[in-house]
Amino acid sequence: MKTTRPTESRERVLLVGVGLKRAPHVPGIDAGEAERASLAELAELARSAGAQVVGSVFQMRDKIDPATVIGRGKIEEVKIEAQLHKAPLVIFDRNLSPTQLRNLESGIDCRVIDRTQLILDIFARHARSREGQLQVELAQLNYLLPRLAGSARELSRLGGGIGTRGPGEQKLETDRRRIRDRVRKVSNAIEAIRKQRSQRRQTRQAVPLGTVALVGYTNAGKSTLFNALSRAGVLVSSKMFATLDPTVRVVRLPSNRRVLLSDTVGFIRDLPPGLIAAFRATLEEVQESALILLVTDISNPNHAEQDAEVEKILKGLGVADRPRLHVLNKIDQVTPEHAAALNGNHNSVRVSALTGAGLEELLGRIDAAMPVDPILHLRFELPLEAGREIALVHALGRVLHSEVRDTVMAIEAELPTSVARRLKISPEPVLV
């Protein structure tokens, strides 16, 4: 008898967004339009987390209510909507303070989370490597720590009055101490992994290969492009943040030079600073890159705003002035008229990672834009017992002359700059 697996039930959620009537006006964009687009993006995030979006509530306000964000009257409306749609979870499209979170849960009478907590949940679902899992856990712990007081009902009695002092405060402090201890352990583990990654990166730098980093808004098609260029077989999904763990592959350029192509985590608007800090090791691939490919989903009507968010994060990483190519992806999903009207520049190239259109041109542009590893004509000495280093010089350079002098080998050779840096030699340059 054939058995069927039960269908996984998805949690029903209600979304809440807020726009400001007196927000800075952008020509051509109505008040609240950016916030509505952000709410639509929140719906995609919720679906990526496995939720079923059953409805949404949007409110325009003069200013944010400091206690509840949306005001007491609107809380009652959200409560009724949640009950009508049988939604046990309400997600707010903004970051909530511990006090706001507590007041909203009390007023709506159901579980409430904010945008940051939703993103953390998606990251926790998609992290596969040990490093990624530790980074997500660190971000979750740092998010939870200031919100422990908001969970007082579950932790202990913290109300005022006779019989409520002491035990609750001790329990709260115990929880805080446990979280701080775990944060310290996770941070130490991440630092150890970061050092290992640094050592592996130094080993890679022994070979004169530059690194090209793919960056862009989440769901812009970076992983599809990565697979098309490197045939790596990285997971491709329409869900946001489907790829968290960095992947590096060798790609051969038209000139027969080889480069390292790195796929990184996608960015998103209002990405919490704690997440950026937690994924520092992952983003080091971007900071160490010689060339950045900024991938844009040109079929998305909000692609200009998405690129602006990516630029903010690149600036925060200190790589805003790094050489780059702007890759206009998903050209197959726009009309020929739209494609012809695209405003590109000399640093842009139009491609379709799905169909392969424009990939040859992209490889040629990468070849032309990659800084060449300069060849240095050097004289230096290496100990005779440094057989590995001497073999590296012969394998990756051109030895012009060598002779043994007591316990060292004197070498005159032409070496790529990266190899000389890897050997940590103190060379005597030769003018030619």
Image (tube, rainbow, N blue to C red):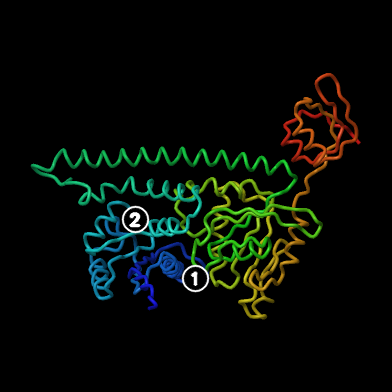
Which quadrant is the N terminus positioned in?
A: bottom left
Chain-order first, disc 2 or disc 1: 1
* Residue 316 drawn above or below residue 381: below
Q: CA distance from mark 2 to mark 1?
A: 26 Å
- Residue 407 x/y as whole percent: 80, 20
Which amino acid lies under the numbered mark 2 shown in the image of this protein? Leu
The structure residue drawn at horizontal position 46% and vertical position 48%, both measured from the top left corner, is: 135
- Residue 174 x/y as whole percent: 26, 39
Please name the residue that numbered disc 2 is placed on: 96
Q: Quadrant of residue 52?
A: bottom left
- Is there a contact, CB below 8 Å, between mark 2 and mark 1? no
Mark 2 crowdedness (10 Å alpha carbons): few <14, some 14-19, many ≥20: many
Please name the residue that numbered disc 1 is placed on: 29
- Residue 258 x/y as whole percent: 75, 53
Which amino acid lies under the numbered mark 1 shown in the image of this protein? Ile
As drawn, which residue projects farthest toward the front?
1
Q: Quadrant of residue 82?
A: bottom left
Residue 32 visible here: no
The structure residue drawn at horizontal position 87% and vertical position 36%, both measured from the top left corner, is: 399
Residue 417 visible here: yes
